[in-house]
Image (cartoon, rainbow, N blue to C red):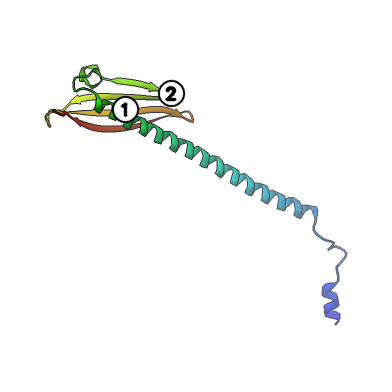
């Protein structure tokens, strides 16, 4: 019985949680919260960059489709006018046209979309071969 009584009694130095323990727990919690905030910021940046890359690719494909609708001898498909370019908001779409010597009645379009994201110049390049429809 004395053993049980001794285990349940508090000594004079054990009066609960000390202020040092509380401060240490708060520091650990603060470091964890800062790590989560940093992770969320990096995730938001990654999502923004990915979204802008997708928009750039959509602009490139859209411009290729517009070029396919044009006449074979249109100025935008003339290789002597290289490089061609169009600005769309923060994006610049530029393309070079080459008359193919290997495959008759085709032209190769090298399309490049450039933009700035978080202070870094980004680019997407697409190559497409347009056949002459007779």
Q: Quadrant of residue 95?
A: top left
- Picture residue at 29% right of the left edge, 20% below the top: 84
Of 10 and 94, which appears nearest the observer? 94
Locate the C terminus by quadrant.
top left
- Picture residue at 33% right of the left edge, 30% below the top: 62
Of 39 and 31, which appears nearest the observer? 39
- Picture residue at 21% right of the left edge, 17% below the top: 80
Q: Residue furthest bottom?
A: 1
Is residue 39 rendered to the left or right of residue 103? right
Instruction: Residue 108: give x, y in percent of width and height.
Output: 21, 29
Looking at the image, is 105 positioned above or below residue 80?
below
Q: Residues within 10 Å of mark 1 (few under 14, many from 20)?
A: some
- Picture residue at 88% right of the left edge, 64% below the top: 12
Is residue 133 rendered to the left or right of residue 63? left
Secondary structure category for the residue under label 1: helix
Q: CA distance from mark 2 to mark 1?
A: 14 Å
Instruction: Residue 75: give x, y in percent of width and height.
Output: 24, 17
Instruction: Residue 26: give x, y in percent of width and height.
Output: 71, 50
Q: Residues within 10 Å of mark 2 (few under 14, many from 20)?
A: few
Q: Which residue is mark 1?
A: 63
Locate the N terminus by quadrant.
bottom right
Q: Quadrant of residue 94?
A: top left
Of 54 and 31, which appears nearest the observer? 54
Secondary structure category for the residue under label 2: loop
Q: Which residue is mark 2?
A: 89
Q: Are marks 2 and 1 in contact (CB under 8 Å)?
A: no
Which mark, by number, is residue 72? none
Is residue 133 rendered to the left or right of residue 14? left
Which of pointers 2 and 1 lies earlier in the amino acid sequence?
1
């Amino acid at each position: 019985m004395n053993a049980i009584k001794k285990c349940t009694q508090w000594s004079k130095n054990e009066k609960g949680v000390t202020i040092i323990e509380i401060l240490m727990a708060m520091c650990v919690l603060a470091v964890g919260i800062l790590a989560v905030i940093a992770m969320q910021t990096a995730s938001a940046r990654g999502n923004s960059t990915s979204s802008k890359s997708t928009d750039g690719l959509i602009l490139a494909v859209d411009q290729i489709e517009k070029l396919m609708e044009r006449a074979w001898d249109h100025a935008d498909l003339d290789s002597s006018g290289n490089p061609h370019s169009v600005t769309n908001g923060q994006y610049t779409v530029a393309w070079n046209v080459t008359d193919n010597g290997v495959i008759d009645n085709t032209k190769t379009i090298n399309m490049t979309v450039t933009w700035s994201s978080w202070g870094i110049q980004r680019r997407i390049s697409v190559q497409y071969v347009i056949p002459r429809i007779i």
